[in-house]
Image (cartoon, rainbow, N blue to C red):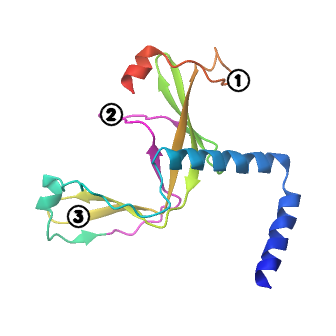
Amino acid sequence: MVSKAKAAAAAAQAEQETPEQRAAKLERARLRNAADKQGMLSGSRRICQHPNRPSKLLQRANGKDIVKKSSVRKNRFMLVFNVAITPKAGGKLGTLKKLDTQTPVMYMDFPEGRLKFFGTLVFPRNNYIMLKIGNKDILCEDIFESMVVFSEVWWVGTAEENPEERRLEMPASVAERR
């Protein structure tokens, strides 16, 4: 009886959706499926046949206390990319847009133009933590309860050359960096 009521409520809600909401829902599902196909996400727990060995820094931290300092930060998202990004000394990685939607976008700037990453919000069953290993203890800096998975990337060039942000051919200089 309850399942029929839920089905009726879902059908009523689907009728009330605007075309923009339906399009956003389809785009979110498409990006999520792309992330599943690329192996970025999984619906089941994977068993690692060749686990990574802990780093020497982590091995030296054996037996230290893990400390979580109180913080009021909310809505912290882990960003997951389908490309390898080489770490730099620091600085700006990119610009996030449409964070108030289910499908955020990130722009990464290059001298030749911009890469546009299409993402979707994912709320995994597991939480992820970021640790900072110190001399005396290990500081738990952040706990990530949600992530933005960027499963598709387009080259859109510069805003002046391509204001509509149509998909363009990837320049060789950027493709080599990938």
Helix, strand or loop: magenta stretch: loop
Q: Quadrant of the N terminus?
A: bottom right
Side of 122 relative to 11 (left or right): left
Asked which quadrant contains residue 15, the reply is: bottom right
Q: Residues within 10 Å of mark 2 (few under 14, many from 20)?
A: few
- Determine whether the residue tagged by mark 1 lies in a helix, strand or loop: loop
Residue 178 in the image: x percent, y percent? 39, 27
Relative to 100, is 135 above or below? Answer: below
Please tell me which of labels 3 and 2 falls first in the chain. Answer: 2
Residue 5 in the image: x percent, y percent? 82, 79
The reply to whether residue 161 is visible in this rendering is: yes
Q: Amino acid at mark 2?
A: Thr
x 30%, y 58%: residue: 48
Residue under label 2: 86
x 33%, y 62%: residue: 47
Please tell me which of labels 1 and 3 falls first in the chain. Answer: 3
Residue 108 in the image: x percent, y percent? 49, 30
Residue under label 3: 138
Residue 164, label in figure: 1
Label 1 to label 3: alpha-carbon separation: 47 Å
Relative to 62, is 93 above or below? Answer: above
Q: Nearer the viewer, mark 1 or mark 3?
A: 1
Nearer to me, 26 or 122: 26
The segment highlighted magenta reads 68-95
Q: Residues within 10 Å of mark 3 (few under 14, many from 20)?
A: some
Nearer to me, 51 or 25: 51
Looking at the image, which residue sits at the far front?
A: 49
The reply to whether the magenta stretch includes residue 156 is no
